[in-house]
Image (cartoon, helix red, strand yellow):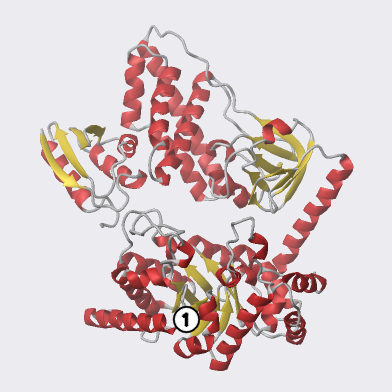
Amino acid sequence: MLCGIAASSGVGVGRALIYREADLSGGDRLVEDAAEELERYHAAVEQFCVRREEKAQRVSLTAGPQQAEILRSQAVMIRDPYLNGQIEGRIASLQCAEAALRTVCGRFIETFSAAEDEVTRLRAADVRDLRDGMLRQLLGLPEIDFSDLGPGTVLLADELPPSAASSLDPANVCGIVLRTGGRASHCAILARALEIPAVMGVPEVLEAAEEGELLAVDGSKGCVYLGLTAEEARGYEEERDEFLRMKEFLRCFVGCETASKDGMRVRLAVNVSNENDVLRAEEYGCDGVGLFRSEYLYQERDALPDEEEQFRVYRRMALAMKGRPLVIRSLDVGGDKELPCLEQEREDNPFLGCRGLRLCLREEEMFLAQLRAVLRAGAFGDVRLMLPMVAGVDEVRRVKALLERAKAELRAREQAFREDLPLGVMIETPAAALTADLLARETDFFSIGTNDLTQYTMAVDRGNSQVAYLYSCYDPAVLRALRYAAECGHAAGIPVAVCGEAAADPLFVPVLLGLGIGELSVHPAALLATRRAVSLWTGEEAAALVHQAMALSTEAEVHDLLEREKRI
Amino acid sequence: MVSKRLTLSNSLGFHMRPAGVFARAMENFSCDVWVYHRGVRANGKSIMNLIAACIKCGEEVEVRCDGPDEEAALCRAVELIEAGLGERRR
């Protein structure tokens, strides 16, 4: 078994097809007639652009316009006057087109790869793809085309360039394993769009696998099983069928209300990082956005986003929610998530340092701009503000004072805003959980961030393999923190939501129901499974389960109980 | 030849999109357009060249135009850069 990065979920079973990049190094020769060689080069450019456009149109239908844009940008690059001028100059001095192309593209690849920012570095892959596509034209080699691979093919490769990946047909390719890449690579995004199971970042795959052998790809777990016997393959086929059956079965939860078995309504909201996530969530249906991570507006840029830019994004999302709530979490970064547009000191303990709300309170002007943008967006929908990393009432009061300042500024400008903007806090530090009774008096809602709450309650870094075993929301300590926060929220009559990964854990959903949590907020892909998990329990059954769980002394005991009581 | 020194104010510097905005606008002029940055000269009509120059926000560049419509070209170049190349200004 080989392990890698789970890049696109599902199970695929089929025969290995090892794709190796063709040798594109040939074709060097002496040129006698520069004009003739130039003509040959220009013809290749024309052909290249025609082919890219054909592919772009095809891929636009299967995987969406963004993938098509990647291919079109290559046509823009090859027609670029400078790049073209460099190549033509070399051909004019009797270099052959292939060599000229290699040298000139090579320089750009080198420059782009060395760039400080990631956006430019990613362009290097495009130049490489463009160079190889042009070389194929010139050398009379066919374009890489996976569209006529036989059914039941598992594609193994070093990497798949954007132009090649765009010809993948999910009817034939049932799995992809790459030596390189990760969840954010072009190819991973494409595989998910086409729903082909994929595992990436498997360094030894090309040496370990044999052409034509039976293998299985588990893109949910990130595993590749090589050299299967027919019988073993059938086992994985069953797993695949089970995955597909489940996926198909979950379709019947699309657009439904979320309710427990005895008809108690539970609000099911979605966690989003950008506007695309909202579109995905809308396919499955949700009761609003329970967590909008505003960080993406601040990332990968040199300057802070101003009020106007933020306002426009928040307003678009508020309008898209059509009256359902949009909970915007104020900027949540810190020593571990650095922003190039903000000066942050190096800290010895970034997780215990100036992060989340603490940073916003330090950077008052930046925070005020965000508050004004959120307030203004509130005039266009049910916008709410949520504060991360709160450690006590004092911080909430400071935010309230800043909100008043922001409102005064907007009034002076005569701009519309939401006067009664609901203000909520995330319960994710033990301090917030222990003072939940006090916080509940000062705020309009709670949202429990189970990831950080678990980390801080257990005092454990989940990334540290020596202690990661301690990281579990099933731990009695975390359960108690959750229960206290929920009880305080209910006593004060404010809504209590859960927005961490625990909200999407089918084992844990009944516990949350039993604690009286009224809203679960999960990532878009987990909406349907969570809706189903909720529907399997009555309120009474869930409360009984919590009662049992609270009587247990260790994480393992709680885990066992939840496994035993699991409903499928 | 006419020229002007100015500071890049769009948030990301000469990236794919801003470089595209600039290069496409400059293509409409028949004069040569050069963007000098840290002693390196980039063709102002080339997206690739402008990206490769890695010019970042807040850095100073010199735009030189040379040819029959150089005045109009420089005027347009300055206008574009000062307006943040289709992006938000710092």
The disc numbered 1 marks a residue on which chain? A
Position of A7 relative to B35 (above/below): below
Foreground residue among B75 and A262: A262
Instruction: Decide if residue A258 is in sight here.
Output: no
Q: Let me know if residue B14 appears in the view.
A: yes
The residue positioned 36% from the left and 86% from the top of the image is A419
Q: Position of residue B16 (x, y in %)?
A: 36, 44
Residue corresponding to mark 1: A424
Up the image or down, A116 lies above or below A399; here it is: above
Please state the horizontal and vertical placement of residue A398, each as a whole percent of the image. 35, 81
- Is the N terminus of chain A in the top left, top right, bottom left or bottom right quadrant? top right
At a point 51% along the width and 29% down the height, the residue shown is: A133
Quadrant housing residue A433: bottom right
Q: Position of residue A383 (x, y in %)?
A: 44, 78
Q: Is residue A157 left or right of residue A414?
A: right
**Vertical position of residue A212 compared to residue A352: above or below:** above
Badge 1: residue crowd in 10 Å (few <14, some 14–19, many ≥20): many
At x 10%, y 36%, the residue is B2
